[in-house]
Amino acid sequence: MQQLNASIVDIAKQTKDNANMAGRAAMLTSDIKTNAVKGNQQMGEMMNAVKDISASSQNISNSIRNRRGQ
């Protein structure tokens, strides 16, 4: 009877530990998702900035060519 009781206590402890670890894993997964979304938004902002820089560079280049042609 004592051995059975000890086994039940061990199983209950392991179950509790597993539940705690599952909760931590869920929180980490949520953090990863949040960071991935944020990283994706930042990448989009960076791509837009690169496009703007490229367009500005093209405008400067065109202005220089036009002034040389005058």
Image (cartoon, rainbow, N blue to C red):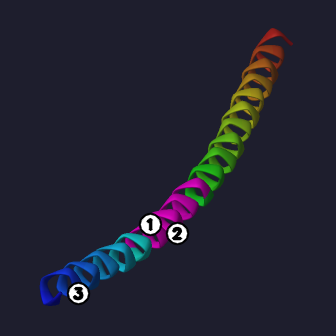
Q: Residue at x 47, y 65 (%)?
A: 28
**Mark 3 Cα-neighbour bin, 10 Å: few <14, some 14–19, many ≥20:** few
Q: Amino acid type of disc 2?
A: Met
Circles 3 and 2 in contact, beta carbons < 8 Å:
no
Vertically, is 15 above or below 69? Answer: below
Please say if 70 is above or below 29. above
Residue type at mark 3: give it: Asn
The residue most toward the front is: 1
Q: Is residue 13 left or right of residue 70?
A: left
Q: Which residue is mark 2?
A: 27
- Quarter the N terminus occupies: bottom left
Q: Is residue 26 magenta?
A: yes
How much space separates mark 1 and mark 3, taking CA atoms? Answer: 26 Å
* Residue 62 found in image quarter: top right
The residue most toward the left is 3
The magenta span reads 21-33
Labelled disc at residue 5: 3
Q: CA distance from mark 3 to mark 2?
A: 33 Å
Foreground disc of the pair 2, 1? 1
Q: Specify which label sits upstream in the sequence, 3 or 2.
A: 3
Q: Is residue 45 magenta?
A: no
| Percent of width and height locating residue 6 | 18, 86
Residue at 30% x, 82% y: name it.
Answer: 13
Across and down, in percent, residue 11 comes to 28, 75
The dominant secondary structure in magenta is helix
Q: Which residue is mark 1?
A: 22
Q: In percent of the image, x 15 and y 90: which residue is there?
A: 2
Q: Place residue 43 in its image quadrant.
A: top right
Q: Look at label 1 and name its amino acid.
A: Ala
The part of the image, by quadrant, that contains residue 31 is: bottom right
